[in-house]
């Protein structure tokens, strides 16, 4: 009897059924709806991909175990002959379906999984043979980190179709847990959501007008806040389903730690949008000018790396939760490390101190390394971190579970067993990350970009109109001040000429403009008001002050005609003094 006949005779479906049941039981009503409507949801696709990799790992282990550690290779056809029965039967029993459920998507999925199982088994056998030649451990190690992203994505698509076809059965067969949404630390306000729907009102949170803040700064802060809300929701949608087992307290701390990074990315995107608004001369006419869509070309890589870091961090904490659930049976355990220490440790794996830069929030050098297969150091570091975390877990005794005279003994699992499991999860994470980077990340960035542009378009449209009005009012007010100052200058020159009876070949308007320019340069940065009452006597008061310094109006006029800087500056200073302090009564 050959090896594959042995496999066909003894392969057990029990563990496969448990894995399928566990995945289907944890699907929320919202996630089932995503499948039913064929809606792209990144977190749901991640959970499905993780399940498929777990399934491949389990089937590969079963095949290796039944091969009894022989070093012969296996073909896809041999694996397919076994898995081809196991998977359909498992899904049929799990969903209480008829035997004719073997649909096209089921056949395609079975074939794809069989191919990957065969590859994983052969890789493990080859590595085991090489280690045996070096007299090292001959324990087979299944490595899923090199799983082809395209193949995994094809499995995801076929599995999604299967679940879509069976959504009603799944909902009837399993009590789907309710959708769990924790309160975000930076929720989008109701007013902003309502505004985005109909644009009928100007929400209060879109207008932050301070006299000391420029129109551009106001637009930037408004746009940045809108983008921040979009990013906050997307990060939460991506990471929260992965961390459903994390306590609310720890999740809130993790979210708080992410907020500064979110704001940094939001600021960069907002600056790009505002630059486009300025380039399109939005303030020139709010009626016929619309803000251009932001140019995200330069921000694409930063956004992708930012979401990659968020996804990777959540994945590591998910592994921690799995370790705790598997080996500590979700008992009361206490970690020797605080949540803050754990976050710092995770950060150090993804961003070692010797590679940190001022732009560290965007750096993803480790992604480049694992995509090129240079992942050994990263895997060792992450495995070591998770090992240290597990070593620091201690049982917390629960007195009420013991009877008088009894002693509750809590046994910590063997370190070697935990270490092997951690290594499997890390390698699975690397395979998952390769798929997410090459398949999911681009789609996520496109969606975020679209949302950011659409949401900020409404905000920018409102803000630009408000700011245009403010700038117009400011310009109108400034023009009014200039007009008053020019009137005073002309009245002053008329009064001086009347007192001196000088006949000059220099145009009076030229002299007035020259004096106005000198005065405006002196007072343009000052806050002042000119009333009509003050306007009536202002020129007379200026001339009276000049007479205290200069011998006669004639001397003043000659100085103005000859552009004497001393006389011009004297007049400008007198203007400034009277404008700021108010005219004499």
Image: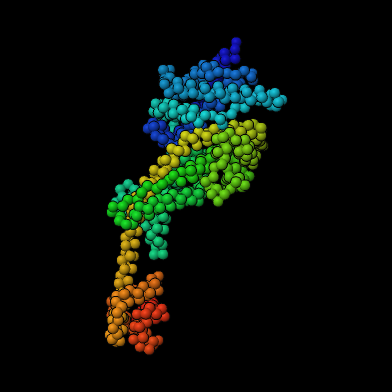
Say which quadrant the N terminus sits in: top right
Residue 249: percent from left, percent from top? 52, 46
For the image shown, how many numbered marks are present on the structure? 0
Residue at x-position 32% and y-position 77%: 511
Placement of 47 over or under 11, stated as above or below? below
Placement of 502 over or under 338, stated as above or below? below
Front position in the image: 106 or 414: 106
Question: Can residue 468 be spotted in the picture?
Answer: yes
Q: Based on the displayed image, in which of its 4 quarters is residue 392 positioned?
A: top right
Residue at x-position 38% and y-position 49%: 456
Front position in the image: 58 or 89: 58
Residue furthest front in the image: 505
Residue at x-position 47% and y-position 27%: 155
Q: Is residue 455 left or right of residue 139?
A: left
Q: Based on the displayed image, in which of its 4 quarters is residue 371 positioned?
A: top right
Q: Is residue 571 left or right of residue 156?
A: left
Residue 133: percent from left, percent from top? 70, 23
Residue at x-position 59% and y-position 27%: 142
Front position in the image: 514 or 506: 506
Question: Can residue 394 be spotted in the picture?
Answer: no
Residue 96: percent from left, percent from top? 43, 22
């Amino acid at each position: 009897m050959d090896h594959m006949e042995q496999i066909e005779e003894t392969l057990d479906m029990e563990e496969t059924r448990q894995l399928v049941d566990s995945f289907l039981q944890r699907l929320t009503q919202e996630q089932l709806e995503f499948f039913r409507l064929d809606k792209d949801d990144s977190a749901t696709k991640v959970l499905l991909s993780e399940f498929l990799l777990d399934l491949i790992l389990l089937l590969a282990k079963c095949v290796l175990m039944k091969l009894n550690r022989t070093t012969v290779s296996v073909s896809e056809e041999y694996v397919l002959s076994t898995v081809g029965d196991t998977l359909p039967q498992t899904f049929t029993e799990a969903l209480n379906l008829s035997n004719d459920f073997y649909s096209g998507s089921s056949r395609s999925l079975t074939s794809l999984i069989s191919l990957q199982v065969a590859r994983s088994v052969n890789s493990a056998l080859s590595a085991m043979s090489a280690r045996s030649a070096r007299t090292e451990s001959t324990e087979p190690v299944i490595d899923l980190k090199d799983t082809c992203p395209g193949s995994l994505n094809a499995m995801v698509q076929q599995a999604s179709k299967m679940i879509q076809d069976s959504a009603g059965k799944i909902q009837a067969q399993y009590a789907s847990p309710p959708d769990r949404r924790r309160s975000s630390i930076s929720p989008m306000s109701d007013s902003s959501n309502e505004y985005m729907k109909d644009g009928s009102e100007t929400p209060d949170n879109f207008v932050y007008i301070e006299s000391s803040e420029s129109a551009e700064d106001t637009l930037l802060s408004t746009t940045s806040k809108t983008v921040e809300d979009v990013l906050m929701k997307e990060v939460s949608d991506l990471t929260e389903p992965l961390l459903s087992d994390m306590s609310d307290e720890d999740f809130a701390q993790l979210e708080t730690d992410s907020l500064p990074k979110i704001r940094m990315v939001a600021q960069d995107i907002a600056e790009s949008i505002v630059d486009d608004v300025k380039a399109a001369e939005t303030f020139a006419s709010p009626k016929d000018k619309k803000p251009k869509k932001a140019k995200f070309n330069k921000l694409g890589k930063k956004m992708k790396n930012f979401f990659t870091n968020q996804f990777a961090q959540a994945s590591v904490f998910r592994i921690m939760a799995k370790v705790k659930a598997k080996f500590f049976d979700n008992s009361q355990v206490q970690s020797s490390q605080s949540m803050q220490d754990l976050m710092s440790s995770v950060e150090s794996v993804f961003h070692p101190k010797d590679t940190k830069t001022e732009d560290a929030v965007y750096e993803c050098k480790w992604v480049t390394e694992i995509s090129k297969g240079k992942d050994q150091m990263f895997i060792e570091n992450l495995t070591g971190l998770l090992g240290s975390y597990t070593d620091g877990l201690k049982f917390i005794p629960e007195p009420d579970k013991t009877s008088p005279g009894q002693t509750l003994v809590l046994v910590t699992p063997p370190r070697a067993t935990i270490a092997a499991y951690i290594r499997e999860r890390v390698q699975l994470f690397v395979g998952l990350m390769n798929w997410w980077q090459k398949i999911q990340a681009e789609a996520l960035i496109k969606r975020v970009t679209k949302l950011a542009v659409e949401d900020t378009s409404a905000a920018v449209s409102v803000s630009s109109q408000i700011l245009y009005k403010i700038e117009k009012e400011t310009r109108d007010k400034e023009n009014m001040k200039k007009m008053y100052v020019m009137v005073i200058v002309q009245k002053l020159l008329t009064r001086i000429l009347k007192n001196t009876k000088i006949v000059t070949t220099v145009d009076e308007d030229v002299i007035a403009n020259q004096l106005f320019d000198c005065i405006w340069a002196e007072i343009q940065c000052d806050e002042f008001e000119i009333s009509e009452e003050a306007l009536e006597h202002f020129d007379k008061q200026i001339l009276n002050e000049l007479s205290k310094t200069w011998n006669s109006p004639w001397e003043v006029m000659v100085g103005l005609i000859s552009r004497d800087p001393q006389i011009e500056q004297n007049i400008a200073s007198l203007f400034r003094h009277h404008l700021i302090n108010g005219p004499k009564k």
